[in-house]
Image (cartoon, rainbow, N blue to C red):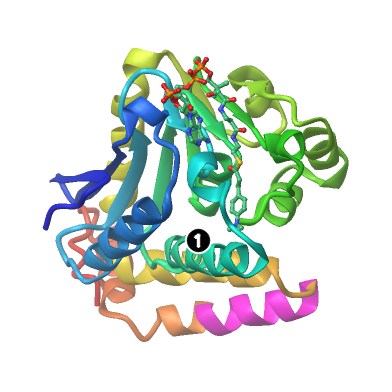
Amino acid sequence: MSYETILYEKKDKVGIITLNRPDALNALNSQVFSDLYAVITEVENDNEVNAVIITGSGEKAFAAGTDIKEMETLNCNGAREFALGVKKTLDKIETLKKPVIAAINGFALGGGCELAMACDLRIGSEKAKLGQPEINLAVIPGAGGTQRLVRLVGSSIAKGILFTGKIINAETSLTIGLLNSVVPPEELMDEAMKTASIIASKSTVIMGLLKDVVNTGRNLDLPSALAYEIEIFGQCFATEDQKEGFKAFIEKRDPEFKGE
Ligand code: DAK
């Protein structure tokens, strides 16, 4: 299927989504969110895709924010409606049973940073620039920026970023844990593909459970999260892949997972 504002290709069990509005620094308008929702649904139903990379087209930006020109005319109700559409898409990415990697090639600001934070891993080029500059526009982040950022880097550092609206570079983003790794720009997609391929080679059914346990547990108190982990650990033993994984280890061979 083809999409209006994004490009989508499949390579070795990895789905690569490219935000494709380079003239607007890949600003995220409602069509982008709608296209993203549709492509993630396509990935969800595609047994040939085990991991996803999201990146931006052009040399400057992953996404320089939600589309300010589109948002300018919104009233209160319109803003809430827009926010619900955005939330639906970011929730879809976060709850997708397949890991999603943001390959951040440049600006990831506002909604762009929020999109990256809804992904599971964030790999940045040395040119990546991240931030939540909404305060400069006299709005607050509306797509998880006040919540996911706090969970990722802690409330003190998050408040520094949110309250000043300052853009932070790749090195600082790595230091505070907002990025998982940083590589030269020309190596970004290779690095993202390398990580995605490792992930894609694992058992898809167990990977889905693993992502869910981490995400669900983050929203629970520790005793409940640990109890949930034990429950899902038990469920692993009801899968064919668990049996294959253990058998392959004992027989000193590579496992052949079926995702069952
Ligand atoms: N929206 C629309 N167009 C944008 C844009 C954006 N966020 N960012 C850049 N562009 C457009 C510019 O208008 C320009 O278009 P033309 O003038 O050529 O037509 C083109 O992209 C190139 O941008 P610049 O000429 O400005 O490029 P520079 O290299 O000089 O500057 C920059 C790059 C990234 C520093 C600058 O473009 C900039 O400051 N951009 C805005 C960054 C920003 O403030 N981002 C946060 C946006 S607010 C919500 C959900 C989410 C949010 C809020 C609510 N709900 C669900 C309710 C989030 C809000 C945001 O993300």
Q: Is residue 107 left or right of residue 52?
A: right
Which residue is drawn at the image coordinates 31% and 61% (left, top)? 40
- Residue positioned 31% across, 50% down in the render: 52
Q: Is residue 45 magenta?
A: no
**Residue 104 location (% of width, % of height):** 45, 31
Q: Position of residue 159 (x, y in %)?
A: 84, 41
Amino acid type indicated by mark 1: Val
Task: State the extent of the magenta-drawn residues as a range.
Answer: 222-232
Of 161 and 69, the residue lying toward us: 69
Left or right of residue 93: residue 149: right
Q: Nearer the viewer, residue 35 or 247?
A: 35
Question: Is the distance from the Cβ of mark 1 to the nearest ligand 1 atom less than 8 Å?
Answer: yes
Identify which residue is drawn at 28% across, 64% down: 38
Within 10 angstroms of label 1, few (less than 14), some, or many (20 or more) residues? many
The residue where tag 1 is placed is 86
Q: 191 and 168: which one is in front? A: 168
In reply to whether residue 228 is colored magenta, the answer given is yes
Nearer the observer, 208 or 89: 89
Say whether residue 195 is visible: no
Image height of 217 relative to 55, above or below: below
Q: Quadrant of the N terminus?
A: bottom left
Q: Is residue 23 visible?
A: yes
Give the overall secondary structure of the magenta segment. Answer: helix
